[in-house]
Amino acid sequence: MDTSYFKKFYDKSRSERIAALQQAGILSEEDAIRLEDGLALSPEIADNMIENQLSTYELPYGVALNFLIDGKDYAVPMAIEEPSVIAAASSAAKTIAQAGGFATVVQKRLMIGQVALKKVPDSALAEQTIRAHEADILKRANEAHPSIVKRGGGARKVSVRIIPADAIGGTPEFVVVHLHVETLEAMGANIINTMMEGVSPYLQDLTGGEALMGILSNYPTDCLATATCRIPANALAKGELSGEEVRDRLIEAYQFAYVDPYRAVTHNKGIMNGIDAVVLASGNDWRAISAGAHAYASRSGQYRSLSSWKKAENGDLIGSLTLPLPVGAVGGSISFHPAAKMTRAILGDPSAAELEAVIVSVGLAQNFSAIKALVTEGIQKGHMGLQSRSLAISAGATGEQIEWVSEQLKKEKNMNLATAKALLEQLKAE
């Protein structure tokens, strides 16, 4: 990838940005033409994706630059409506790339399915029986979906959890059987659901219980992705603050989010700004990813920061982010949604594991930018600078008016909609 074409990328027109991506070797000529034409979902496809379809709801689709992940350069597509997210990700990625980039570890991709059994006569005996018949359970699960087995995947192990009855809450005891399934390049929801329904009758026979449901879990703790980065303190200086001061304040910001759930929610929301935007652009289920991530943040019994930041022995800042990422490279809308197909092209047709590595790296970059801004200049300076365009549009500005109102807003003491409207009226009166 020739990144020389990305100089002042943000100052280029939309057509110039597309041309730069093509010149850098990221886009083919055909893909560039598709981007120029737009990535609109056809009425026919949209009508077959959901029930009672009326129209489509579009989001801006952009690209974050400067990502160096496991020694490979990436331009990362993101679909999001919030200003500053792509700029923040690109800025953080540039700083981190200069320090060696992101290193990632992607755990073996095992998704989890559950069968919940109730009215089990003897739960301890049921657990023993299930464990003794693990091979039979796996065989039946794989017979329920033979195509994934032929491709090298399939059910790999069985685990059991006994959830005691809660007299206060009025809930019964549940014996929960987990099936751990290797779904290869697919996220695997349909595969797992088919398997769980396939083994439910057998589990009832084994335990004497009654199956309440068989369904996948969106909390795949056997499908974790981790990104780390290491930044020299001298690369962190900001204004009058030394690099060491910024480093220490970043670490304290993480510590605050670790101990205080009220802060942790906003801290993690900033991480998910980047993650959800890439997941959405890739055609994956961002709701499942968010649900799993927030559950993972609560795994200690208290909701905490997903990321961690600490000081290395030599004074460098070390960042890390781990979360479950059950994304797929095939299946669902990935194969036919025009934006999802474009995302795959821009990322170089990644495997599911590679896509996980990209997504978790973007999340860590987003977190770095957000907390660095918070502990130095404050979040509003950069955010509101980009928000000025949105305010100009909300005020009714069009065409060249948007740029003029946006620039004037940045000079105003109060950057709000009322000021934007007043500036637009001033421009029209001239």
Image (spheres, helix red, strand yellow):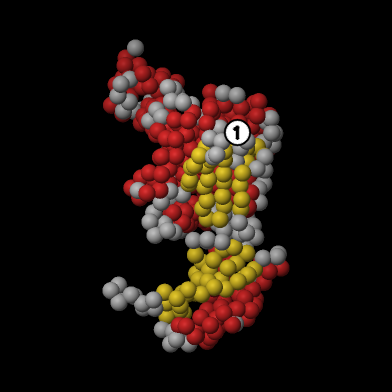
Outermost residue toward the front?
313
Find residue 38 and report its image quarter: top right
Confirm whether residue 206 shows in the render: yes
Residue 257 figure quarter: top left
Residue, x 52% and y 37% (percent of image)?
317
Residue at position x 32%, y 25% from top?
Answer: 415
Can you say whether 133 is above or below 58 in the image?
below
Q: Nearer the viewer, residue 154 or 131?
A: 131
Residue that numbered label 1 is attached to: 99
Question: Is residue 66 among what the camera can see?
Answer: no
| Mark 1: amino acid | Ala
**Front position in the image: 114 or 80:** 114
Q: Position of residue 357 (x, y in %)?
A: 60, 47
Task: Answer left or right for 383 relative to 206.
Answer: left
Where 45 sits versus 189, above or below?
Answer: above
Residue 219 drawn at (x, y percent): 49, 61
Q: Residue 381 appears at what percent x and percent y?
A: 39, 27
Farthest top residue in view: 430
The residue under the point 64% across, 32% down is 21
Looking at the image, which is closer to me, 329 or 250? 250
Instruction: Say what secondary structure mark 1 lies in.
Output: loop
Q: Nearer the viewer, residue 271 or 238?
A: 238
| Residue 67: percent from left, percent from top | 60, 37
The image quadrant where one finds the N terminus is: top right
